[in-house]
Amino acid sequence: MSYRRPVPISKLGKEQKVSMLGAYYEHYRQLAARDPYLLNRKIPREAFTDLVDQIGTLLVDQTRELASRPGPVRVFLDDNALPEPIAGLLPNDFRVFCLALNALKQWLSAEQLATDRFLLGGTGRQVCRDAAKTCIVTGDQLQPNSELHHPIRDGRPPIPLSKRGHVLVENRSTLHDDDPHRSALLALKRKSTQSWKNLRRGCLDLLGETAIHSTPKVGASSRTFARKASKTTGMTYEEIVLWLDKHGC
């Protein structure tokens, strides 16, 4: 059976979107007044351990099969033979596994972007910004390019926050986290005005992985952020990526 992306039962009109977001933001305004941490909830990774194991097992089995049978994958491998120094060191099934991981990464990125369009359509991010004039955490006036923060990654729309509001939400979560690296990385993130996504992309770049940046300048600053993060924490780039995965960043 072919994969079909989830689609909403019905589409909302512009007035319905604005009305819904107004009530939605008010709900979180009240929660933020009680505890900003409630705007930054992450499900434990262990909750999806079985699912991830199943996907990993399927990936290994399917890539092994693709590497051994005639078809476009084998044609690609043959057309891009390994140079002599490493020929024989990288088995075909591992090469296909790496190619499949990259394809999955691109698919995952596209599907995650699609979740933001589920309720509000293609202009959803701008609609979110247009529906709020002040930050629900601090009351600060929002800028046109205000940050969009997902209180929970379960399909609900993101909330526009001021930079100060975003810092407060993320810092509040550190009170529930004894991780020795978090405070250092948060301080570095604030100082460099970078995002967790840029840190991840910078680390992937320095690991030789494919990372997509909006501009070459952003790519360079992301790599600088990653180098500073590694030097500050003593973690390798791979360990930083794992840390970001663990904390849902």
Image (spheres, grey):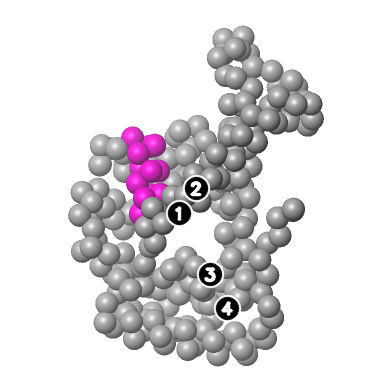
The residue under the point 53% across, 45% down is 54
Task: Give the residue number, with chain letter if any, for mark 1.
Answer: 48
Measured as percent of width and height from the top left, residue 133 is found at 45, 84
Q: Amino acid at mark 1?
A: Phe
Q: Residues within 10 Å of mark 4 (few under 14, many from 20)?
A: some
Q: Amino acid at mark 3?
A: Gly
Q: Residues within 10 Å of mark 2 (few under 14, many from 20)?
A: few
* Label 3 vs 4, first from the N-terminus: 4
Q: Is residue 123 visible?
A: no
* Label 3 vs 1, first from the N-terminus: 1
Measured as percent of width and height from the top left, residue 13 is found at 67, 86
Q: CA distance from mark 3 to mark 4?
A: 16 Å
Q: Is residue 60 left or right of residue 184?
A: right
Q: Is residue 37 left or right of residue 56?
A: left
Q: Main secondary structure of the magenta part?
A: helix
Q: CA distance from mark 3 to mark 2?
A: 20 Å
Task: Give the residue number, with chain letter if any, for mark 3.
Answer: 155
Q: Amino acid at mark 4?
A: Val
- The answer to whether the residues at label 2 and label 1 have Cβ atoms under 8 Å apart is yes
Regarding mark 4 in the picture, which secondary structure is present there?
helix
* Label 4 vs 2, first from the N-terminus: 2
Q: CA distance from mark 1 to mark 4?
A: 32 Å
